Each structure stands twice: as structure tokens, then as C-alpha cells.
Amino acid sequence: MRSTILTLVSVLFACSMHAQTEEENIVSRIFLPSLEIGFVDHGSEFLSPGVIVKTSIELRLRNNNDFFFRVNYDPYDSEYRFENIDGTSNVLSGKVLFTDILGGLGYRFGDSKFRCFLMVQPGIKLYNIPTASISDNTITIEQEGKSIFTTRTTVGFEYYFEKNAALTFDIFQSQVWEETDFWIERGGAWGFSVGVITALL
């Protein structure tokens, strides 16, 4: 009886340790960039370059030389300037806030210290567009909330100063696939960012 109880306790302990190991393995493959900040040029005659702050969560199949999935939530702003509003010589200018919500696949390769990755992410861009109406020589400006489909392609470089922590440098190109609002002639933008990426465990 005593040996049976000891055997049962041993099996339960082994199962518990295995489950804990599996949970740690999953958690160790979830990465959170704690800070990533950069520069973006919108490629639009109506928008000035701006500062972008990138936040994301990433799930890796393996730590290196394999596919991964990343979701981004990236706010950034820009100064806008419109001229000849409704056929007049008036100038409309101000600040606009953009938010990119993206999700997509990438592939990472390299060694224990230096790694590179390629990533493609479709998603939506949220923003406000100023609309002007003229009545009795008075211009009324209102902000209209909009969203538009966008994609981003990223090439990233990482230096791992620990097993699951790295300094990052990303170069990215974003594309808006509709000629509207700020993107009448060109829908492409480019930028870069630097930051730190670490695992949950």
C-alpha cells in the first residue's frame, strides 16, 4: 500500500512538473517589445514626417530560424496642410493622429547573437480627417474619424545580449491601397525604429 501511494505521488509530481515545463516553454516563446520608437515619412505632400511608437506582442514557434506571428498597435502623429480648400485660397493645417493595427507572419534567421527577420502585416489605419465647410465667409472645421486598409513590410535586425532579450533595429515600408484623403497621389510610407525586445519568461 505504501509503495502504491509513493508511486502515485511520484506520477502526480512528474505530471505537474511536465505541465509546468510546457507552460514555461509557451510563455518563453511570447515576446513583448518593451519600447520601440522611430521615424516615419508618410510619402504624402499633405503630411510632414513624424515620430512613431511601436508596441506589439509576438509568438514564436522557436526562438530562431522559424516562423513567428506578431500583432502591432502603433500610434503616431503628423502635421497636415491643405491649400485651396473648396476652391478658395485658404490654408487648413493642424495635427493628425494615426493608429496602425496590424497582424502578420514573419521569418527569423541567424545565430545566438545576431539575427534578422522579414515580416509582412496587413491591417487597418485609424485616423481623423479634417473637413471644412464654408457658410457666409465662415469656415467650419470638423474632424471625421476614418479607417483604411494598409500593409507593412519590415526588415529587422536584432542583437541578443541575453538568450531572450535583444536590441532591435527595424526598417519598414507601409502602403495604403486607396487614393483618398492624405494619399491622393502616393500611398507609400517608410520609416525605421529602434527598441528592445524581451520574452515574458
Image (cartoon, rainbow, N blue to C red):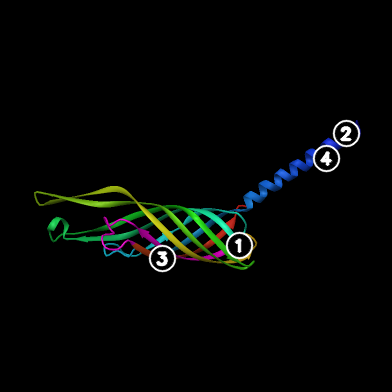
Look at discs 1 and 2 and give the one toward the viewer: 1
Q: Is residue 28 magenta?
A: no
Q: Is residue 179 magenta?
A: yes
Q: Nearer the viewer, residue 11 or 193?
A: 11
Task: Determine crowd level at label 2: few under 14, some 14-19, many 20+ residues with C-alpha closer than 10 A.
Answer: few
Q: Which residues are magenta?
A: 166-187
Write down the residue under mark 4.
Answer: 10
The single residue placed furthest to the top in the displayed view is 1
Write down the residue under mark 2.
Answer: 4
Task: Determine crowd level at label 1: few under 14, some 14-19, many 20+ residues with C-alpha closer than 10 A.
Answer: some
Look at discs 2 and 3 and give the one toward the viewer: 2
Task: Determine crowd level at label 3: few under 14, some 14-19, many 20+ residues with C-alpha closer than 10 A.
Answer: some
Task: Determine crowd level at label 4: few under 14, some 14-19, many 20+ residues with C-alpha closer than 10 A.
Answer: few
Res 148 label:
none
Q: Earlier in the sequence, mark 4 or mark 2?
A: 2
Q: Secondary structure at mark 4?
A: helix
Question: In the image, what residue type sits under mark 3?
Answer: Gly
State the image coordinates of residue 196 (x, y, percent, origin top left): 54, 61
Res 65 label:
1
Q: Earlier in the sequence, mark 3 or mark 4?
A: 4
State the image coordinates of residue 130 (x, y, percent, origin top left): 25, 52
Rounded to the nearest whole Å, what is the CA distance between mark 2 and mark 3? 65 Å
Question: In the image, what residue type sits under mark 1?
Answer: Asn
Write down the residue under mark 3.
Answer: 191
Question: In the image, what residue type sits under mark 2?
Answer: Thr
